[in-house]
Image: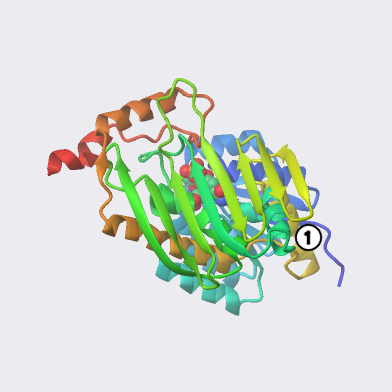
Amino acid sequence: MERKEKLKIGVIGFGRMGQLYGRELLKNPLWELAYICDTGIAAGKAAEVIAPHAEIIDDEDKIFANPTIDVVGLFALADSRPAQLYKALKAGKHVLAEKPIAGDIKTEWEVAEAVAKSDRMVAVNIFNRNAWYHKMMVDFIRSGEIGELAIIRIAHMTPGHMPQEGHGPEGPCFHDCGMHYVDVARWYAGSDYETYHAQGVRMWSYSDPWWVQVHGTFQNGVVFDITQGFVYGHMAQVQTHNCYVDVIGTKGIARLKYDFKTATVELHGVHDTITKTDDFNDKKIDILVDVFAKSVLAGKNLGYPTVKDSVIASSMAWKMFDDAVKNGAPCIGKPEEMDEILARRRTMKQGYGLPLWPIVDEHASEKNNLKNKK
Ligand SMILES: NC(=O)c1ccc[n+]([C@@H]2O[C@H](COP(=O)([O-])OP(=O)(O)OC[C@H]3O[C@@H](n4cnc5c(N)ncnc54)[C@H](O)[C@@H]3O)[C@@H](O)[C@H]2O)c1
């Protein structure tokens, strides 16, 4: 049989992430972008501009029914993914999917089981696994340069994605975004979570905590704390952020900070002291589409992130978030402040985690004023 040199892909969901994939798929010679499926008009218009040679459709079944399609890209929202993934596997397609793989833990594990039983390849975009700076940190830790790994501290705080800005099935930001850092800590530890305790804050008196800090242990005794919140100075005249990883061993340390333009790794080992600054490279979609294409063509995983790692991260993030709720996250601030932030973000051209289109609920403050309901 003739060896394939190119893969034909149909993508479902062409919002913020779908468009990032579209651009990278078009740049990579291993891909042919054949279909773009989106149920929204604005996305269809974006598809016409970005990928004029792709067929733009609103019926996903056209992709599954076409025997020349090798891979399906699932970039819509989490609640639509399981049904699309099952159809893809049934039709013999490989799958490149966004996270989380489903809208609830039970369905996620069912999907993971179906993928494990299938001979098709399925990658999930837990993008930190493709980041040069995390790989450099993990390699240094594993080399023994910092002695025995003891403490992992992670913070990811930006004036980012707000309530009412979409991603409903993905849940509050500690799950939607925080699952990435739950995954990073587990990857660094090289062990599974054992204990945790979480504290949250219901900023602007919104119904869900929008800042959560969790600490605990891994099964191998390594301890961790993760702080995630999209509450970091949304109304500041000049916005900033605070994002870092700080790893402490019995003899040395490894740390990392990033500003979404560059990342800086600082390694202080017993023999080596290394500092490196390079491009942050946003969601690393170029790397993901390349490693996935090469994996499918080679018939083995050459380094793409797996469904199992994604499901573990997602389910732990839900459990930690639920713990923050159980432990009584206090209400701070007013819903009107949230409305002010949403109004500012609607006029911003550049910022952290801005949605592509204004999907803001005008009546957010009435719905979410928990303090007034008490
Ligand atoms: N890995 C990451 O770092 C990362 C970052 C951001 C978002 N995401 C994930 O990517 C997914 C998409 O996020 P986004 O920011 O692009 O959202 P978005 O709202 O910008 O885009 C979603 C698109 O999907 C379309 N859509 C919804 N249901 C559909 C269906 N059944 N069939 C076809 N199209 C459908 C919508 O019309 C929209 O254009 C989310 O699940 C989110 O969690 C991942």
Helix, strand or loop at mark 1: helix
Count of numbered badges drawn on the protein: 1
To which quarter of the image does residue 373 belong?
A: top left
Q: Residue furthest left?
A: 374
Which residue occupies the foreground of this view, 237 or 65? Answer: 237
| 217 to 18, vertically: above or below | below
Q: Residue furthest right?
A: 2
For disc 1, the marked residue is 294
Image position of 210 (left or right of 120): left
| 151 to 282, vertically: above or below | below
Which residue occupies the foreground of this view, 90 or 229? Answer: 229
Which residue occupies the foreground of this view, 34 or 300? Answer: 300
Q: Position of residue 262 (x, y in %)?
A: 67, 36
Image position of 79 (left or right of 147): left
Q: Position of residue 231 (x, y in %)?
A: 40, 37
Q: Position of residue 235 (x, y in %)?
A: 40, 25
- Residue 39 can be seen in this image: no
Packing grade of label 1 (10 A; few <14, some 14-19, many >=20) is many
To which quarter of the image does residue 281 belong?
A: top right
Q: Which image quarter holds the N terminus?
A: bottom right
- Residue 355 can be seen in this image: yes
To which quarter of the image does residue 279 belong?
A: top right
Residue at (66, 58) in percent of width and height = 251
| 38 to 63, vertically: above or below | above
Which residue occupies the foreground of this view, 97 or 228? Answer: 228
Q: Amino acid at mark 1?
A: Lys
Residue at (64, 61) in percent of width and height = 305
Residue at (42, 51) in percent of width and height = 174
